[in-house]
Amino acid sequence: MNISDLCITQDPISLRIADLILVYHIRPIERTMAETGIRIWCSEKSGYRPSWWDMKKGRSGTGAHCFLPGEFGATDWTANVQIQVLLEALIKYTDYTRFGVYPASGFIHCDYRKTKSGKRQVYNENWIVERVIE
């Protein structure tokens, strides 16, 4: 897996963002794949999205995918298994705090933003909490 696989625009990125992608997204997923045998990849290069790209698409430009200063970013992951199997593997082998599950689209949004409960949480596609991970 390459850093460019997690960059939606394929434009050059800063070393800060490259390091965040490697440490907080690629390495945890490589560990998850090694432990489970599941093949996992970034859905549609939806890892890092520059703020300008996000706003061009009608978004706020402040989402977790924008890797704002002080944040660790987000990635949308997909796999060669059912989405619930992927979810349980991500919960077990990564430190992501928020998991947004999009079954119809076949991916799970994963990020490190704080949750209201202070615990890791699983959300449905409408970002309603479905599960608090104890």
Image (cartoon, rainbow, N blue to C red):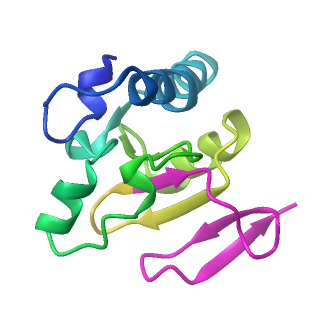
Q: Would residue 112 be found to the left or right of residue 126 on screen?
A: right
- Which residue is at a point 50% across and 29% down the rendered structure image? 20
Q: Quadrant of the C terminus?
A: bottom right
Q: Is residue 25 above or below residue 72?
A: above
* 81 within the magenta span: no
Q: Is residue 125 above or below residue 23?
A: below
- Which residue is at a point 54% across and 20% down the rendered structure image? 27
* 115 within the magenta span: yes
Percent x, y of residue 15: 39, 20
Q: Is residue 31 above or below residue 103?
A: above
Q: Viewer-proximal residue, 115 or 28?
A: 115
Percent x, y of residue 108: 44, 55
Q: Quadrant of the N terminus?
A: top left
Percent x, y of residue 5: 25, 27
Query: In the figure, residue 92 lies in which quadrant?
Result: top right
Percent x, y of residue 64: 45, 57
Q: Which residues are magenta?
A: 108-134
Number of marks drawn: 0
Q: Is residue 86 above or below residue 126?
A: above
Q: Viewer-proximal residue, 1 or 84?
A: 1
- Which residue is at a point 70% across and 40% down the rendered structure image? 95
Q: Would residue 112 be found to the left or right of residue 60 on screen?
A: right
- Which residue is at a point 57% across and 72% down the rendered structure image? 123
Query: In the figure, residue 8 lies in which quadrant?
Result: top left
Query: In the figure, residue 117 lies in which quadrant?
Result: bottom right
